[in-house]
Image (tube, rainbow, N blue to C red):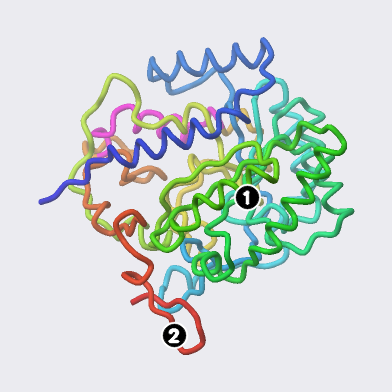
Amino acid sequence: MAFFVKKDLLLLWSRGILRRKNWILQDLNLRKIKNLAKAGMQYALKKEKLSSWPAVVKIDISPLCNLECLICVHADPGSCSHLKRQIFHAKQRMPLEKYRNIIEEIKGKTCAVSLYFLGDPFMHPDLLEMCGIAKEAGLNVHISTNFSYNFSDEKIERIARSGITHMTVCVDGITQETYEKTRIKGSIQLVFSNLKRLCQYKASHSLSCPEIEIQYIKFQHNLHELDEAKKIFKAMGINYFYHFWGDLHNYSDIEPGKYRVYRYKSTKVIPQCLWPYFFMLIKYNGDVLPCCFYRVASQYSAENPSTVIGNVFEKSVWEVWNSLKYQEIRRLVSSPGLSSKGKGLKETFCDGCYFLTLSDFEEITRRADKYRFEDVYAIDKNGKAVRK
């Protein structure tokens, strides 16, 4: 019986938080510092009902996307039942006034908003106005995008002045042949064009924002382009360049039930997950989830088995943040073993999470440092990547 020890997973998670420190901690004021300190204290004390606000609110303004990346819920479903059950349509966009209400409630306490989850934020027609609303409220504004759009010079100027403080652009190579292996339907030339013009506009108008971060997702097939990518993006004027290994499995491959859980981890001195104490995820329809790592492929399924914590269109952010369901999740991450002892936590969103259990989770993942594209995918006669 091979338990999955999540040292590598936790290392990746901690590195992810370090990458994000720029847009989480920038422009702190006394009130936000007090809120962070209070959250840290309550996390250390394993409090279930909090007096602090989430430090970061992640808002899925739309789950729609223009690409079909292999890891994502937007990938070609093929024979995958999870992906076949996905439902996406044009109305899945957060109404501007609902968004405005969320920002009004969290301003002054929360440090930042991050406006994406499973979709690309540029699919929302009101994205730039939303960024401006959050910026005016004193919030750092982060987006992550594939940036593979045919944007005009006017649109690039609007992006530069929209209020976005930090923008992440995910790149899987610098030639089209390499890039499109995983970024299905994407154009690296469009990405380069948009980035170059955005950097030029920032420089010519002495703008410090948006700070632009390139995430070069590493695979065996794009390592030979990494050094050249660093040079290209440095010459453009990109603020940050990070590279790390990607995944060749799909989100649907790591849903609950796809791996065996042997037992829950032992209780530690501090809770074994930061999310219920520092972060909140709000979907376009107001539903609240405790994190963006778990049960991902279930979120837009016709038969969604995931358990939402509440809805901020029906109750306030604060009411949901301290609801009984959120308190149950904090109890679970503080003492994972309670779930197996009949303490009423089996129905929570986090039950069975690979951060909280010993499992064979690692055996079903296909991480790019250990697997090649060709080990997992074949190219059919139409040039499409299909699972072996």
Q: In the figure, residue 366 lies in which quadrant?
A: bottom left
Q: Which mark is residue 380?
A: 2
Depth order, front residue of 160/70: 160
Q: In the figure, residue 241 lies in which quadrant?
A: top right
Q: Main secondary structure of the magenta part?
A: helix
- Residue type at mark 1? Ile
Q: Which mark is residue 199?
A: none
| Residue 368 picture location, percent across and down | 36, 57
| Residue 159 picture location, percent across and down | 80, 46
* Mark before the other along the chain sequence, 1 or 2: 1
- Residue type at mark 2? Asp
Looking at the image, residue 238 lies above or below residue 299: above
Q: In the figure, residue 24 lies in which quadrant?
A: top right
Depth order, front residue of 259/237: 237
Element assignment for label 1:
helix
Q: CA distance from mark 1 to mark 2?
A: 33 Å
| Residue 46 picture location, percent across and down | 38, 20
Q: Is residue 229 left or right of residue 211?
A: left
Q: Which residues are magenta?
A: 321-339
Asked if residue 208 lies in the magenta stretch, the reply is: no
Looking at the image, residue 94 lies above or below residue 324: below
Say which residue appears at 87% left-offset and 36% top-offset. 205
Say which residue appears at 17% left-offset and 46% top-offset. 3
Q: Which residue is the site of mark 1? A: 232
Within-10-Å neighbours for mark 1: few <14, some 14–19, many 20+: some
Residue farthest to the left, as pictured = 1
Q: Is residue 299 left or right of residue 104?
A: left
Q: Is residue 6 left or right of residue 55?
A: left
Element assignment for label 2:
loop
The mark lying in front, picked from 1 and 2, is 1
Q: Is residue 255 left or right of residue 99?
A: left
